[in-house]
Amino acid sequence: MAETTPSGDNTLLRETVSAREIGRMERFLGPENYRIVMGLLKTPASIAGFILIGFFILIALAAPVIAPPVNAKDPYKIPRDGFKSEPQPMGSLWKTKQPPLPFWWESIMGTDQWTHILGTSQGQYDVFYGIIWGTRTAFRTGLMVTIATFLIGIIVGSISAYYGGWVDNVIMRVVDVFMTLPFILAALILATILTPRIGKSLYPAIIALITFGWMTYARIIRGDILSIKERDYIMAARVIGVKDSRILFRHIIPNAIFPTLVLASLAVGDVVLSFAALSFLGIGTEVGYADWGQVLSFARNWITSLDTYWYIIVWPGLALVMYVMGFNLVGDALRDVLDPRMRGKT
């Protein structure tokens, strides 16, 4: 262990500065990154968020074991137990095209017959299967859209702030135009236009959410870069002839990106909610695709009878709420750790 112990004859410094051991993890990550990691690990909200996210990751990875697919070539297609419109209750027996039993079924459920654990929705789609495989859909769409919008926003906002002048004016006016459009309505219209051309899949909704989701990142990173690019070390790098690309990506963005990272961590849940809203409206994926929004859409005709068929909306809704809550808790904790006013309190 290395120690920050004063040396020499400086008695006053030795008495006023306490020695602190620096562990291997702190030396590996660096003081600032180590502070962030430890802050997240010590914050109750972030711990709860990581537990929820880890739980959904395990479900996504173990989906073929938890709910074996009937069709291995298309595992995201929710199996149907007939075509009856009225939902079947929780625990009802599977009558037609019963999926293969997983190894854990008999020991836990005490029967050798597959049952609808969480019931069926309209059209006899198995709710349990839709929730389990819908976890993979949530991760795929949430991460794809968030990463894409984050990168686009970082690039656009960085170029706008660094070069300024007419470049900044043009880019920001484009951003203003995009931000005047209602997000969900604009994404809905674009996804509707793309679906006949691309076909029913995840991609029309994903492309629509990316197209109208990058502007906030661009605005935030632009504001942070405008304050950082005037600092002395940036001016010194310009004077000695360092390339603009190196100054921007090596010195400016790493020091300005933290607020945008916080926004991105919070946006994963928002993206999943937006995608579920589009699926609920029938945009994008085919009917019967394992997606929480579409599982919820099967309950539309039974809203007035939820006292009887409550399970068709409670279970997919609960999965959606817990998933979004996990990312929001981690994002809130990350914001508190990175906020200079909160230093020393985490």
Image (cartoon, rainbow, N blue to C red):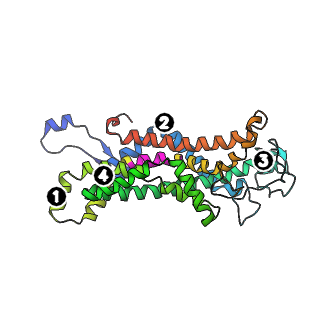
Percent x, y of residue 182:
49, 47
Q: Which residue is mark 3?
A: 122
Please provide the residue range marked out in magenta.
260-269
Q: Pointer 1 and pointer 4: residues touching (CB < 8 Å)?
A: no
Within 10 Å of disc 4 (Cα), the crowding (few <14, some 14-19, many 20+) is few
Q: Which residue is mark 1?
A: 236
Alpha carbon distance from label 3 to label 1? 66 Å
Residue shown at the point (80%, 45%) measured from the top left: 109
SS class, disc 4: helix
Closer to the N terminus: mark 4 or mark 3? 3
Residue 266 painted magenta: yes
Closer to the N terminus: mark 1 or mark 4? 1
Query: How many numbered marks appear?
Result: 4
Describe residue 159's horizontal placement relative to residue 99 as left or right. Answer: left
Could one spot residue 26 in this view of the protein? no
Q: Pointer 4 and pointer 3: residues touching (CB < 8 Å)?
A: no
User: At label 2, which amino acid type do we have?
Assistant: Pro
Percent x, y of residue 98:
83, 56
Front residue of this view, candidates 98 and 346: 98
User: At label 3, which amino acid type do we have?
Assistant: Gln
Front residue of this view, candidates 239 and 301: 301
Closer to the N terminus: mark 2 or mark 4? 2
> Residue 301 falls in which quadrant of the image?
top right
User: At label 4, which amino acid type do we have?
Assistant: Asn
Alpha carbon distance from label 2 to label 4? 27 Å
Q: Which residue is mark 2?
A: 44
Closer to the N terminus: mark 1 or mark 2? 2
Describe residue 168's horizontal placement relative to residue 302 as left or right. Answer: left
